Image (cartoon, helix red, strand yellow):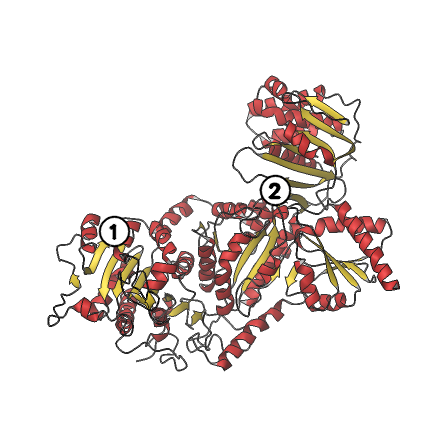
Amino acid sequence: MRFSGEGGQGVVTASDMLARAGASVGYHVQTFATFPSQILGGPTWTQTRLSVNLVLSPGDYLDVLVAFNNDAFEEHKSEVQQDGVILYNSSEFTPAFDGLAIGLPLKELAKEAGDPRAANMVILGALSKLVDMPLKYFEDFVRSRFIGRQAIIESNIKGLSLGNTNVNADEFHIGALVEPKKSKETLVFLKGNDALSLGAMQAGLDFYAGYPISPATPILVFMQKNLLGPGKFAYQVSSEIESINAILGAGYAGKKAMTATAGPGLSLMSEGIGLAWMAEIPCVIIDVQRGGPATGLPTKTEQSDLTAAIHPAHGDVTIPVIAPGTVEECFYAMIDALNWAEKSQCPVILLSDHSLAERSQDFVKPDLSKINIDERLIYKGSNGYNRYEAKGISPMPIPGNPGAYIANGSEHDYVGDTTHKGSHHIHMTERRFSKLKLLDSYPYERLNRSQSVALMPWGGSKGSALEAYNLLKKESIEISWYYTMYLNPLSSDLIHELQKKDLVLVPELNYQGQFSSILRSEGIKAESITQYTGLPFKVKDLVKIISERIETHKKEIVV
Amino acid sequence: MSVEGNGHNNHPEYDFKWCPGCGDFGVRRALEGAISEYNTKLEQTIDKTVIVAGIGCSGNLVHLVEGPQPYGIHGIHGRTLPIAFGIKMIRPELNVIVTAGDGDFLSIGAEHIAPQASRNLDITVVIMDNGVYGLTKGQSSPTTVLGEITSSTPYGKFEMPLSPLDLYLTYGVTFIASGYSSKPKDLTKLMVKGMEHPGFSIIQVQSPCTTYNDTYAVLKGNLKLGIEPGIFEVPQDHDVTDKYAASKLVNSGKIPIGVIYERTDIPTLEDRINIVRAKTESKDIEQLLAPYVI
């Protein structure tokens, strides 16, 4: 169900309430939203998909389109599936539409409910009738959300009821939703950016520095509010250049430090990330990808920063990268990223994207007692220590304690003094790269592994690809499934397995096919399925492209 | 005497040298004295000292400290202040000192001065101002004088020289001092004052480059050549809390040496954060997760 209109019309609230009310009674839910890059107004839409089964993708078609104005109707009408319903605001317009459309005078009904802001409640009341979701779900939700604010509760409940009675559902039937099953386990329902923020708190984050940038800003806002205990510190700094240098200062001083940004900020951080690699300082950079390059598409989704994340700086360097594919994975990937930084004493990049950041999903509440938190090796000896002498990872002295050294961005000797000797550059380069081996052999997903053709998405495209995989399987189109969020270093076991495949298809939201190019450099016959519309993959498109590609592949074999 | 701090006093493998007569020798000696004096007063070891060095001749100071070794970061060009910010705000008990040159601090790194001044970050900055990019062999810097011929200004420098002291006053830096590398004992005193000052301290030091911009004669004056001294002592009756008096001093056409400006009544960033910390209860992860539970 998609809600569309002008920013500020209650579009977001309506969708959010539907999602939360649905999740609270036991439906699995996934939301998706896209906003204009302006403060007020502008075309906005947000959608909610509910199911008794796990919701993997935002969905290809609309069962219900709620259009608050004519522009919204025109923009989205083509995506309404056959038998789908359009619910429109008849106070504003009457759509020219052959299919099923039903108008509600939102302005008048909201006024009758006693609050002009209750228009979205009228919509939800109507929806509850159209999809046979008991009105009680919404009423209960309103009561718990606005505890103690009796006037709002009353007007909202009246709005729900007016919507419910004023919609004539006789002609329309989009099918009742299956009765939800409430999970025995406690669930949480949140957005990707929230999951990253909570994961960082769980991993023991001490220091956060950030600069506002879409779509990463909610992480800064969360940290400014919550990372405030004794010895903890979050701050909005003056640029991404300041962010990266501040977090590596804190990392050097012995603390867990992080920043979050999007592509433009990652570009500005380039030199600082190189310094953290060179001087072996733990820190974590979140890149919530958006369309690029330059300012690009600030409020649209893309997976086009992978190459930049793996090679963010000049010189001989590669940075560990973890890219979660669901909101749940965001939580655990964030913990892994901070753990990795500690384990390898180097910068780590967590790659999210706009669609993950702005998507809400339900998942089982993490069992915090089972989460492993890593701490760096700390030097605890006396003075006379050579911090960079060992061939691999070595304990890190912390300022305030014996073992003083210089963390140097120039090539250095065992105590960190600058040197230009070839032997030292060889020693240090090999030492830095050796630490990546500590991060190999992380788990990956694998299904139907005997097939010669494999599907291997990454990051935020995971859900759509998995739904496509399931549909293909139903149609008896056989293909293997591989997936990992640990993109650099890639597990050597996974590489070996993929090298045996005849074809590995990689759905990814960029023009160049960045991930498949990395796989090919490992001797894997990988090929991308690309899209660069600013929106996530539609499942039907993936199913079509994959099945066609499998057909041509069979012909290639015959020839 | 037992060596305090990690012992690598002679930096045997370090292959960088300042030119003979470089002002930075004096700055280093002054800083060694200041760190020692400050730590003795506070009865703390040198492990609590972190030097954040910029790039260029001046930045190499961090490798040339003799005697007990402090911690150090020799980072990237222009970013000393952000690094120092990260260290100080997460480990306020450390004595964080920035050392950089006029090119590093006032050109590529200039964007970072205003934010730290607004925050009143409690660190001490020592700027070695030689009016030239020395390590890249003599290009013009923000403090190079108008019309000066350098390798990158073959027809003379087109820009007016920056007045760093005036800039710091404008930004609201709460401790501003000006020193001269040939007077290391006085310089040590200024540096200790800077370290003791609760807030953002900058000591701008005239530190001539004997190879590319030898300003010793201009600074000290030379009566035989009819050159009047380019520096003068800050008058004893100068009120360091008076911004207008400070402004007059730094705009007098010559370089004042001494404490220019000091405000001790402005809270540091840490003070401000601590007020909020005292009023706010930090939430554990279960409390943070609670609003998302369905």
Residue B292, which numbered label? Answer: 2
Specify the subunit that label 1 lies on. B
Q: Which residue is mark 1?
A: B263
Q: Give the residue displayed 67% in from the left and 60% down from the top.
A: A515
- Numbered disc 2: secondary structure: helix
How packed mark 2 is, by other alpha carbons closer than 10 Å (few <14, some 14-19, many 20 or more), is some
Give x and y (percent) for residue A523: 72, 69
Task: Write down the quadrant of residue B112 in the picture.
Answer: bottom left
Q: Nearer the viewer, residue A314 or B286?
A: A314
Q: Quadrant of the C terminus of chain A?
A: bottom right
Residue A143 higher or lower than A502, as above or below: above
N-terminal of the pair, mark 2 or mark 1, is 1
Q: Going by the image, does B174 lie left or right of A252?
A: left
Give x and y (percent) for residue B18: 32, 76
Q: Nearer the viewer, residue A274 or A404?
A: A274
Specify the subunit that label 2 lies on. B
Q: Quadrant of the N terminus of chain A?
A: top right
| Distance of label 2 from label 1 (alpha carbons) | 47 Å
Circle 2 or circle 1, nearest the eye: 1
Give x and y (percent) for residue A62: 73, 36
Q: Going by the image, does A117 lie left or right of A476?
A: left
- The disc labelled 1 sits on which kind of residue? Arg
Q: Are marks 2 and 1 on the same chain?
A: yes
How packed mark 1 is, by other alpha carbons closer than 10 Å (few <14, some 14-19, many 20 or more), is some
Give x and y (percent) for residue A553: 83, 59
Residue B129 higher or lower than A216, as above or below: below
